[in-house]
Image (cartoon, rainbow, N blue to C red):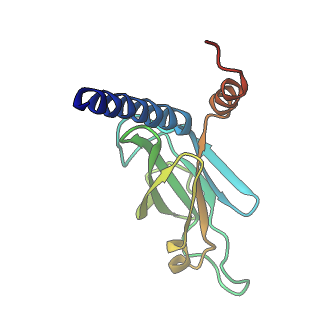
Amino acid sequence: MRTIFFSVLLIFGICLSVSAQTTAELLRPVRVDITEGEFRAGMQPVTTPYATGGPWAGVPARALKPEVTPTVSDFRIRAWLEGDGATARVLVFAVTRKPGSLIGSDDERETQIASVAVRGGRSVVITETEKYNARPITITAMPDARALVEAAERLRQPVQR
């Protein structure tokens, strides 16, 4: 009796492990987007953490209220995969730039304003932008749509014995 009980527990544990791994693979973010109103930019998350350089994506800072001017020029993100790969770590930066200087020049300064973990298929609103007189931005981790469609198709197929 104990042998049967432990066998059932072992099989149940293996099924849960395979299910969790499959779910993580399906939800793996293949793109992280930063949006504010009609502005949208995105990037593919990398596999190792970093805080400077590329790749990055950004959107312009837009006034929180019509009568105020944002104190930064734009917001930028950098992203990498964490843990089981179904979560993206996203660093959010406020960017200031001297008037007339180019994006990425030495006259540009970044200040980290947030660090968030975003699971595939989820979004996070960043309100820390408001202290710069700018509208909140949204960070979204987009899972691989093809993998989700393929998984749904496999579920629709009858089980063969």
Q: Residue 154 occupies which quadrant of the picture? A: top right
| Rendered-image quadrant of the N terminus | top left
The relative height of residue 137 versus residue 117 in the rendered view (above or below) is below
Horizontal side of 48 relative to 77 (left or right) equals left
Depth check, front residue: 24 or 73: 24
The relative height of residue 94 versus residue 90 in the rendered view (above or below) is below
Point out residue 125 in the picture as x, y percentages from the top left corner.
57, 66
Query: Which residue is at the far bottom?
Result: 67
Q: What residue is drawn where x is 55% and y is 34%?
A: 26
Query: Which residue is at the far front?
Result: 1
Depth check, front residue: 122 or 42: 122
Horizontal side of 5 relative to 92 (left or right) equals left
Residue 100, can we see it? no
Horizontal side of 111 relative to 61 (left or right) equals left
| Rendered-image quadrant of the C terminus | top right
Point out residue 89 in the picture as x, y percentages from the top left corner.
42, 49
The relative height of residue 45 versus residue 131 in the rendered view (above or below) is above
Q: What residue is drawn where x is 63% and y is 29%?
A: 147
Query: Which residue is at the far right?
Result: 38
Q: Residue 126 occupies which quadrant of the picture? A: bottom right
Point out residue 19 in the picture as x, y percentages from the top left corner.
47, 34
Point out residue 60 in the picture as x, y percentages from the top left corner.
64, 61
Q: What residue is drawn where x is 63% and y is 73%?
A: 135
Q: Residue 29 occupies which quadrant of the picture? A: top right
